[in-house]
Image: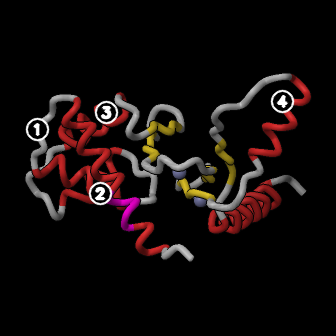
Amino acid sequence: MTNLTTQRATNHTAKLDHFLHTLQQAGLRLTSQRRAICEYLANTDRHPSAYQVFEALATTHPDISRATVYNTLNTLQELGAIVELSFGSDHTHYETNPEPHVNLICLRCHRIVDYHGDPGIDALAQRVLAETGFQTVAAKIDLIGFCDECRSQRLQEIRELAKSATRQSPQ
Ligand SMILES: [Zn+2]
Ligand SMILES: [Zn+2]
C-alpha cells in the first residue's frame, strides 16, 4: 500500500525542484522571494491567480513586490512549468498540478478544484480511435459549472429574483 502522506511530500519536493530548476534555466537568480513563490506553488492545490499568490506571500514576505510575483509566474508559464487557465481578461489562474486530471471550474466563485476520480479518458480515446481514426496522445478536461456551495446560493438568488419580478409586475 502506498503511503499517501509520503507520496504527497515527495510530489511537493519534486514540484518545488522543478519550479526552481525552471527559473535557473531562464537565468533568474533564486532570491528568497522567488523561492517563496515556488514553495507556495508547490504546496497549493488552489489554482491561484497572480494576485492570490501575492496576497498569500505579502504577510510573510513584506519585501515581495507584485512585479516579482507576476514576472516569476510568467517565466514559469512560458517554460511550461505551470499552465494558464483563463476566464476571460480579469481571471487568469495557474494550474500547478502536472498530473493528468480534470479541473472543476466554478463560474460563480471562480474556484478551480482538481477531480481525482477516473474521468474515463481511456474509453473515450478508444471510441474516438475506432470512430474517426484519431489517436489521442494527451487529454485536457475542464468541467465548467457551479460548485456545491454556489449551486445553493444560485437557487436562492434565482428565487429572490423571481420574487421581486412578481412583486413588480402589474396585477
Ligand atoms: Zn462556486
Ligand atoms: Zn487542476
Q: Which quadrant would residue 140 be assigned to in this image? A: top right
Residue 85 picture location, percent across and down: 50, 39
Residue tagged by mark 4? 129
* Badge 3 vs badge 1, beta-carbon distance below 8 Å: no
Q: Are marks 3 and 4 in contact (CB under 8 Å)?
A: no
Q: Is residue 52 left or right of residue 141?
A: left
Q: Residue at x 72, y 64 (%)?
A: 160
Q: Is residue 147 left or right of residue 33?
A: right
**Nearest to N terminus: mark 2 or mark 1:** 1
Distance between the Cα atoms at labels 2 and 4?
A: 40 Å
The colour style of the image is: secondary structure
At 63% across and 35% down in the image, what residue appears? 138
The kind of residue on which mark 4 rests is: Leu
Marks 2,1: beta carbons within 8 A: no
The residue wearing badge 3 is 74
User: Where, quadrant-wise, is the C terminus in this rendering?
Assistant: bottom right
Which quadrant would residue 39 be assigned to in this image?
A: bottom left
Disc 4: CA contacts within 10 A as few (<14), some (14-19) or many (>=20) = few
Task: Calculate the distance from the C-alpha at mark 2 to the C-alpha at mark 3.
Answer: 15 Å
Is residue 125 located in the magenta-colored stretch of the structure? no
Q: Nearer the viewer, residue 110 or 48?
A: 48
Q: Which residues are magenta?
A: 9-13
The answer to whether 91 appears left or right of 141 in the picture is left
Q: Which dot, 2 or 1, sits closer to the camera?
A: 1
x, y percent for residue 115: 63, 58
